Amino acid sequence: MNTVTRLALFAGLLALVFAGAALAGSALDPDVDGESASVEPHGSEREHSGGDGEDAHSAPQGSPAKGLAQADRGLRLVIDDPDAVATEGQLAFRIVNERGATVKDFDVEHARRMHLIVVRRDLSGFQHLHPEQTKDGGWTVPLRLDGAGTHRVFADFSSGGESYTLGTDLQREGRFTARELPHPAQAVRTDTGLEVRLQEASGEVRFTVFDDGRRVRDIEPYLGARGHLVALREGDLAFLHVHPESDASEGSDIRFAVEYPSKGRYRLFLQFKVDGRVHTAAFTREVGEPHGH
């Protein structure tokens, strides 16, 4: 074999070696072109499909809307026995991790370790409950569903410094007649007869309470603040995280920072305490353009 032939064979062998190395490298690292792979890190704000028929991407990315999915960032809401609500008037549920183990450690948020919001799909029958934790880490609470039809259940909590709102549906048998959503109004009456007036500007929602025309100033602390507000979007019932802007000792108004994720109609449920009693006022808001984008 002459020298030229040897050099040609050696060059061919080197080419085979480099081709094999490149193929192995691409198998180990698919980002061979320098483009970042679309991988969602643990703890991202994107909603995951909860497996209960909900489209977890109904809300725009980056919006504060939550509760569209049964699972999020590795945690899942599990109802132990849905039929027990109808038969026993009791709801038992738990939060499980990716391994199916019950999560037992929760942070105190808004003075509680677990908030349970229940509302019918037509945004009637609003309930804000505080379940008791059982020895095995689950939660239980008395619950009666208001009217036949589909009811949305939201578990609102924080664990490991991360806030979650997980949602699923409960059914009540019977003939369902949807209730019309009330028209938007600047003033409504609570279930106890107090008048609540609403003002909204620049992302701030301000409520003022009146009793027989007299401005109520002695609003008592409720869940660590002057009030608690839940905002739900009509249709998919996206849950907005709403934060109070003042503590329980500032002035007579109840103020919140609200960022609507999209245009549409929303139902705002305000709860506050006067004379040792929690009062609830509900408002319909029509949003023409997205905020915060």
Image (cartoon, rainbow, N blue to C red):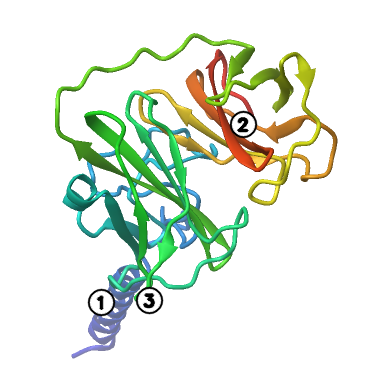
Where is residue 111 drawn, in percent x and y?
A: 62, 57
Write down the residue under mark 2.
Answer: 259
**Quadrant in which the N terminus appears:** bottom left
Residue 135's tag is: 3
Query: Mark 3 belongs to which amino acid?
Result: Lys
Confirm whether residue 55 shows in the render.
no
Q: Nearer the viewer, mark 1 or mark 2?
A: 2
Spatial CA distance of label 1 from label 3 is 63 Å
Write down the residue under mark 1.
Answer: 16
| Of the pair 271 and 192, the residue shown nearer to us | 192
Which label's residue is closer to the chain start, 3 or 2?
3
Query: Mark 2 belongs to which amino acid?
Result: Glu
Spatial CA distance of label 1 from label 2 is 59 Å
**Quadrant in which the C terminus appears:** top right
Label 3: how many Cα within 10 Å (few below 14, some 14–19, many 20+): few
Label 1: how many Cα within 10 Å (few below 14, some 14–19, many 20+): few
